[in-house]
Image (cartoon, rainbow, N blue to C red):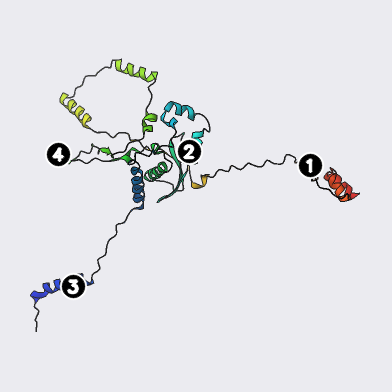
Amino acid sequence: MIVYTVSHAPLLILFFYYIYRRYYSVVLEIEEIIDPIKEYINNSKEEFLKTYDNSDTNMSENIEPIFYNKKDYTAFMKTDKNEIETLWKTRILHENTPKGSIVMFYDAYKQAFTYYTDHTSMPVTILNAVAMKYVMRFSCRDFYQDEQTFKVKKENTDNKKQKKNEEDYPEDEFIENTYISPLIKIHNEKEETTETKNLKTLSNNAAFVRLKSYNNANCHDNNEKNVQNKKLPQDKNVNKFVSLGKMYNCHTLQNNKPQLKPDENTKYDEMFKPLVISNVSFEVTPETDVIKTNLSYKDFKLSKQD
């Protein structure tokens, strides 16, 4: 007979716990909850960046050469209902997103992606993802101008710079084999006019009064060094989006059917002219005699009264 003492209690507890875990417990696998918005954006970005791997295909073949010449572009866009503007309005993308449906096309005059949606506040990340699909569908990749899509955070390998100051901003670097659109430089650079050149020369040649500083010189030098070392955030190139309202405002199907003109002869007598039938012989009767003659409705009623 086996006698269990109090000293054996911990061993028994461990034994029964082992049996329970080994044969009776069910291990539940915790599934990772995937955000549908992030999944949609990542899939669109992955497909978009793959287009840069194949350098043989021209992903901007549908863009007209006039877009790459600023002077010709501005002169051509001044004409009302030009061919390029109307053509790009017919290239329409219907897309279902996690935030709702979007109808998008490119406005050549505004240089923006215009869209219809029933969602009140569509995130810019979703709009960028739809714009990626648009430029891939219609082979106009240079229209996409979001700079952050082509960048990743630069890894800091220097151990001395583990602690960053709050004033420093993380540096980004471009993904390999990618490049931003050349249309950014063409259309965003400001041309120097004669007035701006004259203002520059005046500012350089002007004599400014320098007031006497009562501060310490060392403090002034330290402030200058801090300003030089401080990294300020630069303006980034982004896509331009223009909302055109709800989905019911979208008229993608153009009705090219000719409109029927109203009957010009709206007079009472003209509306009741007899029908003229050619190459048909009728037997002369009182009824057919009325049809053959050009008789008005008023005369017809008077003849019936007689």
Residue under numbered circle 2: 88
Q: Residues within 10 Å of mark 3 (few under 14, many from 20)?
A: few
- Say which amino acid is labelled 3: Ile
Q: Callout 1, which amino acid?
A: Glu
Mark 2 Cα shell of 10 Å, populated few (<14), some (14-19), many (≥20): some
Which residue lies most toward the bottom here? 1
Task: Name the element at disc 2.
Answer: helix
Residue occupied by mark 4: 160
Nearer to me, 272 or 214 = 272
Q: Residue at x 36, y 44 (%)?
A: 125
> Label for residue 270?
1
- Residue 19 tag number: 3
The residue at 36%/50% (across/down) is: 40
Who comes first in sequence, dot 4 or dot 1? Answer: 4
Marks 3/4: CA distance? 52 Å
Q: In the rendered image of this protein, does residue 209 appear above or below residue 126?
A: above
Q: Position of residue 23 (x, y in %)?
A: 21, 72
Q: Between residues 249 and 221, which one lies in front from this camera angle?
A: 249
Tell me how far mark 4 sits from mark 2, CA to CA: 53 Å
Q: Quadrant of the N terminus?
A: bottom left
What SS does tag 1 mark? Answer: helix
Examine the image and state in which quarter residue 18 appears.
Answer: bottom left
Q: Point out the tag, 3 or 1, that comes first from the N-terminus.
A: 3
Of circles 3 and 4, which is in front?
3
Q: Give left or right: position of 109 versus 36.
A: right
Q: Given this view, does label 4 or label 1 mark the residue nearer the observer?
A: 1
Q: Measure how far apart labels 4 and 1 are at the Cα level.
A: 99 Å
